[in-house]
Image (tube, rainbow, N blue to C red):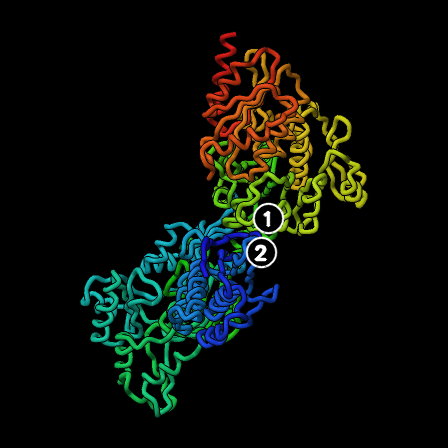
Amino acid sequence: MNITRTRALRGPNLWSRHLAIEAIVACEGDERSIAQMPGFETRLRALFPAIGTLQSESGDVSVAHVVQTAALALQAQAGCPVTFARTTATSDAGVYQVVVEYSEEAVGRKAFDYAEQLVRAALGQGGFDADAVVAELRELDEDERLGPSTGAIVEAAVARGIPYRRLTRGSLVQFGWGSKQRRIQAAEIDSTSAVAESIGQDKDLTKRLLHAAGVPVPLGRPVDTVEEAWEVAQKVGLPVVVKPQDGNQGKGVTVNITDRAQLEEAFRTASEYGTVMVERFLPGHDFRLLVVGDQLVAAARREPPQVLGDGQRTVRELVDIVNQDPRRGEGHATSLTKIRLDDIAVARLALQNLTPDSVPDKGQRVILRNNANLSTGGTATDVTDDVHPEVAARAVAAAQMVGLHICGVDMVAETVLRPLEEQGGGFVEVNAAPGLRMHLAPSYGKPRNVGQAMVDRLYAHGDDGRIPTVAVTGTNGKTTTARLIAHLFTAQGLRVGMTNTDGVYVNGRQIDSGDCSGPKSARNVLLHPEVDAAVFETARGGILREGLGFDRCQVAVVTNIGAGDHLGLNYITTVEDLAVLKRVIVQNVAPTGYGVLNAADPIVAAMASACPGKVIFFAADRHNPVMATHRAQGHRTVYVDGDSIVASEGSWRETIHLRDVPITRNGRIAFQVENVMAAVAAAWGAGLPWQTIRRGLSGFVNDSDNAPGRFNVMDYRGATIIADYGHNPDAMRALVQAVDALPGKRRSVVISGAGDRRDEDIREQTVILGAAFDDVILYQDAAQRGRADGEVMALLREGLAGAPRTTYVDEIRGEFIAIDAALARLQPGDLCLVLVDQVEEALAHLAQRCAEGGAAA
């Protein structure tokens, strides 16, 4: 068994909408059917009994299927919510594509590694400790996944359809896209100022501000020495509380201090965390009131960690029993935290004349901490429904006085049923980024969906934080269509983020260059705060490598599917395989969105059944059966009628004259007419007004600025030059048809071939060109993409054998040298098609030559 090319699919992908690990697993001989391997399954189950059922669609369970099942089962045993896995045989005998869902990438990768180790152990190659592996995966999952507070907010956002993305491995999360994005860090939102957070950390300043707002607070102040602390304690009156002025989670807090010895010890403990504060101890229970915006959304009564004596067991044994509660764990991953018998607990026991090895009397309540924080082992009881309106109003006033949008207000009082003044209670702290565990999963009482309240604070009702998003794929026309759609959004006054094979553009500025048609570039655009709408050219390579860069789109456009588009790579061997891959964007259209499909391409038209939203078909021929049926059913279609493009829905029509769309050259360039129809349908699906669509189409000129390398027309000494990035047989046919519609005496073409195509696809390009051009100048690409030197040139030359029209053929090394050679042969009235490789450099070279030619003329 050999496992290669393990990669993480971080978005909707060829296999599913799930995040997944994909790997290539090669099996030799009997490994292709474990039924031929006596004792293997017995050893496997002895090593990992929880592996579950081994099965495959074909009936033969290979070792690859075992790896898939084991990787999924290991994650499930570690507590990960995963269910999807699949193993598919490839066109290579004994080679399988294995896909296993993950919830956390690091856990998924590690589980896959351990699945391989398990299989090798069952094959007699090493050992495997299932318990240790599952424990390690569980610990890794707890480290990687969001904590309960952040996780609750994310779950509430997902329930509303709001997209999210973790910006760090910690709790910093972005909700929404582009200009609609919001960010949180744990239970703190981006609109909360650092000043407000600083105030909340300064206990003395917080108290003074709350007092100024008329909110009851205990008397006290910061101190520098033990003597000063004792002086303040006597002034405010014993008992007192000693705590750090800037603290959290109850660290360094000692309560109910009644003499100087206790105060000195408490001072030493608190001073380890900074400036010490002494204040009057308020009798009663510890309550946490959670305020979001101008509302109290939850309240809990907190109890310090404690055990109840039974007259038989020691304190240590009683703590061990309490810690066996499955709700208790280490850190914040579980609803409760284990009680620790540390120095602080031992000191608290000493105040009760106990040690960890003492046996408390039956029914004796043994307190193990002075504070009631859940992080130190305390418990919480929900009291939200009991809070008096006056208490709730005071809590909101306290949060707003400090300036916190999400705030945990700590209150000490006998009850929440009566106003504070009636019972001598008060607020003791105001906390930014409060923990939510006690409200989400209280020890006793009703859980509260506080995450929803926080998401409602970020986004108004009905707002899902999404911007209009269009994904464009196909074999030819993708880049021009994407640029045209982006131009139409811009005409509406929106700031557009666009990715394509030329780069990344935000609001008209290029912020990245090169082939940026993959998911990473799409995610970067959605991160940008200046983007009001996004248009993504979505290439096959990115979908294969990583999946989509978004969870769903408003509009998905498929221009066409051709045979020359990288067939033979990554087990995409047929046009049907390619269609299944490119169909991924259609499968991930929003239920309220549209799939824009080319009805003239049967493979594309068949994708309609996979679209969760509605479908807009486009084709030049309105009598196309798919178009006619769709139109008869009252659905949206876009077609050509005479010299106009028509959009139709039911009995409604909208007409756009082709003479008003410069890119089509009065409708003579057929493939540009198709691109325009696709763009019009996409803009319609995105809800743009027709006035905007008309204005945008009339202003889109097909030059090297708007659409570099996409049928850019130039003049050189009276000859016509057309520069295009076409690089497959379908593109050649479309270009020949377009060029035939233009005047030209002698016609020449400059072409190279991409090495990452099948031999027959490279040859077919020059078969097509040889029937349409008088002169053919071949040049070798700068990058041969895995081919030997001269191999592509030889295939191109083979395609010209017996060419019915070509009378002149030349082979030149170097793109720019070939261009110059072609220009030198041109006479006024001639036409030259230059199929560029290095788009930007070649266009700049041509522009310079045309400028020099004009000057010479």
Query: Helix or strand or loop: what does disc 1 sit on?
Result: helix
In the rendering, at what x and y percent does residue 119 appear?
45, 67
In the rendering, at what x and y percent does residue 754 appear?
52, 35
Mark 2 vs mark 1: give the one in front.
1
Q: Is residue 655 above or below residue 429?
A: above
Amino acid carrying mark 2 in the image: Ser
In terms of depth relative to the viewer, which is nearer, 519 or 714? 714
**Which residue is rendered at x = 50% and y = 47% of the image?**
181
In the rendering, at what x and y percent does residue 214 appear?
41, 60
Viewer can see residue 424:
no
Residue wearing tag 1: 581
In terms of depth relative to the viewer, which is nearer, 795 or 381? 795
Residue 16's disc is 2
Q: Residues within 10 Å of mark 2 (few under 14, many from 20)?
A: some
* Quadrant in which residue 675 is drawn: top right
| Relative to 809, 314 lies left or right | left
Disc 2 to disc 1, C-alpha distance: 11 Å
Q: Is residue 382 above or below residue 550?
A: below
